[in-house]
Every structure is written in structure tokens, then in C-alpha cells.
Amino acid sequence: MELLQQTPVIFTPGAIAEIERLVAEGKGEGKKLRVGVKGGGCSGMTYVLDFDVPQANDIAFTLSGIDCIIDPAHEMYLFGMEIDWQNGLNNRGFTFKNPNASSTCGCGTSFAV
């Protein structure tokens, strides 16, 4: 597994705090945080942010002490993306600001390039 020197995504302090909370609760034990995409959603592609076992072709990076993995084929879709955590009344969850997206859906979890 290759180790990236420059991180492909950015986590806000809110996202880091939420991920650290999940790790402290035992979520993802023995796994790394996968950042990626998959086909689907109303705009064509959906974001993936979940704990997973690294695969042989994954690229690893560490961001604020969080061990992350990404499929190298997904890097071009996600490079420069900011991941935030919202904890408000109208919006609770991770949000994604992707400079590579040509359009996004209303809920912000899918995009097109």
C-alpha cells in the first residue's frame, strides 16, 4: 500500500472531532477510514466515508492522526474536497464540498463530474 505525502481531502475541525468520537466508541476497530465514491445517487456518484479494511491497491494517508485509505481511481474525483460535520437542527451529518463536481444534488451526498 502506497503512502501519500499530500492528503487528497481536507477534514474540518468538526469532522475530525466526529471521527475521533466514532473511533473512541470502538467503531472501525482494526480498520481505516475509507474516503471514496461509488456509482449511484441522484447526480450519478455518491460519496463513501466509512471504516473499511485496506485493499492491496489502496493508497494510505494520515490526516490529523486519522488513518485513511482511498482507491487510487477515486482520487481524481475527490482531490481538494472538504469534509465537514454538521450538527444542526436542519442538517446533521457529514457534508462534502467538492471542487471537482460539476453539479450536486440537493442533499449534498451525490455529485456529477
Image: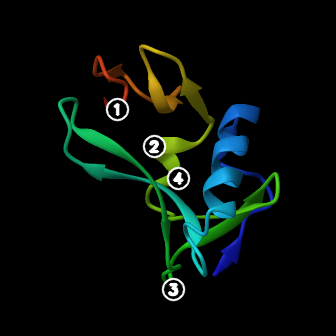
Amino acid type assigned to the residue bearing label 4 in the image: Glu
On the image, numbered disc 3 is attached to which residue?
A: 56
Amino acid type assigned to the residue bearing label 3 in the image: Ala
Q: Nearer the viewer, residue 72 or 82?
A: 82
Q: CA distance from mark 2 to mark 1?
A: 8 Å
State yes or no: discs 2 and 3 in contact (Cβ < 8 Å). no
Amino acid type assigned to the residue bearing label 1 in the image: Val
Dot 1 surroundings within 10 Å: few (below 14), some, or many (20 or more)? few
Q: CA distance from mark 3 to mark 1?
A: 27 Å
Query: Which numbered disc covers residue 75?
Result: 4
On the image, numbered disc 1 is attached to which residue?
A: 113
Q: Nearer the viewer, residue 111 or 108?
A: 108
Dot 4 surroundings within 10 Å: few (below 14), some, or many (20 or more)? some
Residue 113, how many percent across, how many down?
A: 34, 32
On the image, numbered disc 2 is attached to which residue?
A: 77
Amino acid type assigned to the residue bearing label 2 in the image: Tyr
Residue found farthest to the bottom: 56
State yes or no: discs 4 and 3 in contact (Cβ < 8 Å). no
Q: Nearer the viewer, residue 42 or 24?
A: 24
| Nearest to N terminus: mark 2 or mark 3 | 3
Task: Give the SS element for disc 2.
Answer: helix
Task: Give the SS element for disc 3.
Answer: loop
Task: Give the SS element for disc 1.
Answer: loop
State yes or no: discs 2 and 1 in contact (Cβ < 8 Å). yes
Q: CA distance from mark 4 to mark 2?
A: 5 Å
| Nearest to N terminus: mark 4 or mark 3 | 3
Q: CA distance from mark 4 to mark 3?
A: 16 Å
Quarter containing the N terminus: bottom right
Dot 3 surroundings within 10 Å: few (below 14), some, or many (20 or more)? few
Query: Which numbered disc covers residue 98?
Result: none
